[in-house]
Image (cartoon, coloured by chain):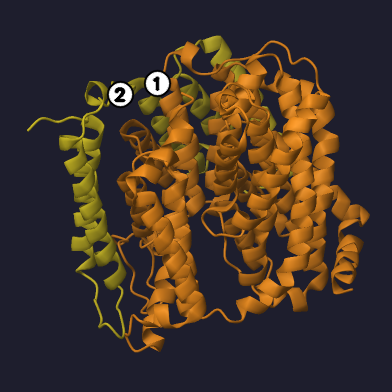
Chain colours: A orange, B yellow
């Protein structure tokens, strides 16, 4: 009965009027942000952090979570309507969703995405509620070598995210790790690579990197193209609901996607993005006529969308139970918790049960709100997106610039963002994908700290990573994954999904 | 020896230089021992790995055939200059001139990066965004942003 009791505690918290309001506010804000290209949940959460101090921690986290899955949702909307994935994880949705939209079936695609996500969200919430406690028990088995191995696995996972050259994706991970080295050494307190600049001694804020490389770099690259290559708008979205046949086609895809999402969402580094990508490959494999994929197959929307959303739910598990961020947004959530005096980790569940379970159940509440909010709002989203790009990109720039400045009321962060804008543009020109860099940057310092601690514990004996069972398992999985992507045949398939539809 | 991918050739060189720079920089810090690794241990190793990966990319650019030499393409100087310039301008002048002056100017500068720039649109956009941002960030969220030019 523990399971039901926990859900009861959770719903008591999440269904309180004030928390319902914050869940709604977060979901709405998140959707709006996801729909605006360039303004992601990272920027928004970063912008909102200062004003979060005044909120009650539970409400603040519920709102942050609302922004997170709202943005996932909104990102899919733009992916379908104008082929602009607002979020990394909706890249795959754009492949078939946009094709459906161009065939005049945008309504069906949007509704399938919404309902598939809601279904996945419901299952995902139950998985989190049921398996968070056993995973928490596991968390106590985690020492420095295990953490280090887990991060190694996450970094290898990050490589799989990139669709282009393997060497370049690896290089981006390593570059991210190196950028993470610009800080004060945690063990000896020696400032590294700071060139005497005080601001650099605390390290670069990763929001600065994310905004510079993704938002600003993207805008520069987009402006460099002629106007007709940028966005394609569709005049009218007709036929909101999917047909019976659509339901028949998409239901099994959504179910498979949900299972994949629940499993892969827990992996650090990979998360929802890897889940949606894998689901697309699986659907393509099991489909009766794979030729439809890339031409507007509804399974290609339902599967990845479900996977993405289920993954978004279960990616909270490592964050809640181990205090490890599985994505940039999770890192910000941890930051928010720390700001409010809550040390993330296994103890949160026992010291703060109403926060822990309230957050979990609010995920389901948030998902329900998203469906209620989004189905009728599709028409309005389309209107918002018809704002001409010449008005849209200065707006994105303006909000990001304020966001960067208010991170620590410091102009140094603004200059850093400018530098990373140039870097983001260079990445774009040279064909580097920035996602692995961000993950390397986030995981790097933690991995170093744990690596050094593990070596200290084991008196410099590297075999500590393979003699402890949990760590050894993860190393084996990571190495297996590495071999799998290095093998030319499989590596070719990895690129296939992305290349074929261009 | 012919460059078969211009993009990867430049990428490879850039990675080697960056990796080497980090590795050389790391020699300023103590390496420690295998038992007690110092602050230079991790960045040195990573720098070397990055340089090796750069070498692999560089090798690939000279050996693997790509479509049409995989050129880098023209650099759009105007958007690049305008966007980066606008960010730097905002960072430099916000504390000096305040939000109500530096923010609209930044938006006009940004808008100038597009190829559909007209003064009318840019000024209108700057006005609307300044009002919205004021309402959201300063009035609504109560963020501490200097509004007017600083004294002295």
Residue A224: assigned label: 1
Residue A348: image quadrant is bottom right
Residue drawn at 39 percent across, 50 percent down: A485
Instruction: Give the vertical position of A448 relative to A250 (above or below).
Output: below
Residue shown at 48% from the left, 48% from the top: A208
- Which residue is pictured at 73% across the width and 12% down the height? A236
| Residue A173: percent from left, percent from top | 38, 53
In front of the other: B102 or A165: A165
Above or below, A361 relative to A474: above
Report whether A359 appears left or right of A428. Answer: right
Q: Which chain does the residue under circle 2 lie in?
A: B
- Residue A316: image quadrant is bottom right
Q: Which mark is residue B75?
A: 2
Q: Secondary structure at mark 1?
A: loop
Q: Are marks 1 and 2 on the same chain?
A: no
Distance from Cα at disc 1 to Cα at disc 2: 8 Å
Expressed as whole percent of the image width and height from the top left, the position of residue A381 reads 73, 25
Local crowd size for mark 1, using a 10 Å CA cut-off: few (<14), some (14–19), many (≥20): many
Does the CB distance between marks 1 and 2 fall below 8 Å?
yes
Helix, strand or loop for disc 2: loop
**The N terminus of chain A sits in image quarter:** bottom right
Q: Residue at x 57, y 13 (%)?
A: B121
Within-10-Å neighbours for mark 2: few <14, some 14–19, many 20+: few
């Amino acid at each position: 009965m523990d399971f039901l009791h926990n859900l009861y505690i959770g719903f008591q918290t999440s269904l309180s009027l004030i928390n319902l309001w914050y869940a709604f506010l977060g979901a709405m804000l998140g959707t709006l942000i996801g729909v605006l290209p360039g303004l992601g949940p990272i920027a928004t959460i970063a912008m909102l952090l200062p004003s979060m101090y005044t909120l009650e921690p539970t409400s603040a986290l519920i709102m942050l979570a609302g922004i997170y899955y709202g943005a996932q949702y909104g990102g899919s909307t733009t992916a379908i309507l104008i082929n602009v994935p607002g979020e990394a994880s909706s890249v795959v949705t754009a492949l078939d969703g946009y094709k459906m939209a161009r065939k005049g079936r945008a309504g069906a695609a949007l509704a399938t995405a919404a309902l598939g996500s809601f279904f996945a969200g419901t299952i995902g919430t139950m998985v989190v509620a049921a398996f968070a406690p056993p995973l928490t028990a596991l968390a106590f088995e985690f020492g420095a070598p295990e953490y280090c191995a887990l991060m190694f696995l996450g970094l290898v996972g990050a490589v799989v995210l990139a669709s282009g050259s393997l060497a370049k994706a690896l290089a981006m991970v390593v570059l991210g790790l190196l950028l993470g080295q610009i800080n004060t050494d945690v063990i000896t307190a020696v400032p590294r690579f700071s060139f005497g600049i005080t601001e650099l001694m605390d390290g670069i804020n990763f929001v600065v990197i994310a905004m510079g490389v993704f938002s600003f770099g993207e805008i520069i690259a987009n402006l460099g193209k002629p106007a007709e290559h940028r966005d394609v708008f569709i005049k009218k979205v007709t036929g909101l609901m999917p047909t019976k046949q659509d339901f028949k086609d998409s239901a099994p895809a959504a179910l498979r996607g949900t299972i994949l999402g629940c499993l892969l969402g827990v992996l650090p580094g990979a998360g929802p993005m890897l889940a949606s990508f894998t689901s697309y490959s699986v659907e393509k494999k099991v489909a009766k006529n794979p030729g439809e994929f890339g031409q507007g197959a509804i399974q290609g929307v339902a599967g990845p969308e479900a996977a993405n959303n289920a993954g978004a739910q279960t990616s909270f598990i490592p964050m809640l139970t181990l205090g490890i961020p599985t994505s940039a947004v999770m890192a910000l959530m941890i930051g928010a918790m720390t700001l409010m005096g809550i040390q993330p980790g296994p103890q949160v569940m026992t010291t703060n049960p109403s926060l822990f379970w309230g957050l979990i159940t609010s995920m389901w509440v948030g998902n329900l709100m998203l469906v209620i909010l989004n189905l009728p709002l599709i028409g309005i989203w389309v209107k918002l997106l018809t704002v001409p790009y010449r008005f849209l990109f200065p707006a994105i720039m303006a909000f990001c610039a304020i966001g960067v400045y208010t991170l620590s009321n410091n102009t140094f962060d603004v200059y850093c963002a400018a530098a990373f804008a140039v870097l983001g543009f260079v990445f774009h020109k040279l064909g580097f994908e920035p996602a692995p860099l961000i993950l390397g940057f986030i995981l790097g310092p933690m991995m170093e700290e744990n690596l050094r601690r593990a070596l200290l514990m084991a008196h410099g004996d590297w075999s500590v990573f393979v003699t402890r069972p949990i760590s050894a398992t993860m190393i084996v999985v990571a190495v297996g994954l590495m071999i799998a992507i290095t093998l030319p045949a499989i590596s070719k398939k990895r690129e296939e999904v992305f290349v074929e539809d261009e | 020896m012919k460059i078969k991918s211009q993009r990867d050739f430049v990428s490879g060189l850039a990675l080697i230089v960056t990796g080497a720079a980090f590795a050389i920089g790391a020699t300023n810090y103590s390496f420690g021992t295998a038992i007690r690794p110092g602050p230079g241990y991790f960045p040195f190793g990573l720098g070397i790995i990055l340089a090796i990966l750069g070498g692999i990319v560089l090798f690939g650019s000279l050996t693997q055939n790509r479509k049409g030499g995989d050129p880098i393409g023209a650099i759009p100087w105007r958007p690049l200059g305008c966007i980066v310039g606008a960010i730097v301008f905002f960072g430099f002048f916000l504390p000096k001139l305040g939000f109500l002056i530096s923010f609209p100017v930044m938006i006009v500068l940004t808008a100038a990066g597009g190829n559909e720039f007209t003064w009318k649109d840019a000024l209108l956009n700057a006005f609307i965004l300044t009002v919205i941002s004021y309402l959201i960030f300063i009035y609504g969220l109560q963020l501490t942003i200097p509004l007017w030019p600083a004294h002295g």
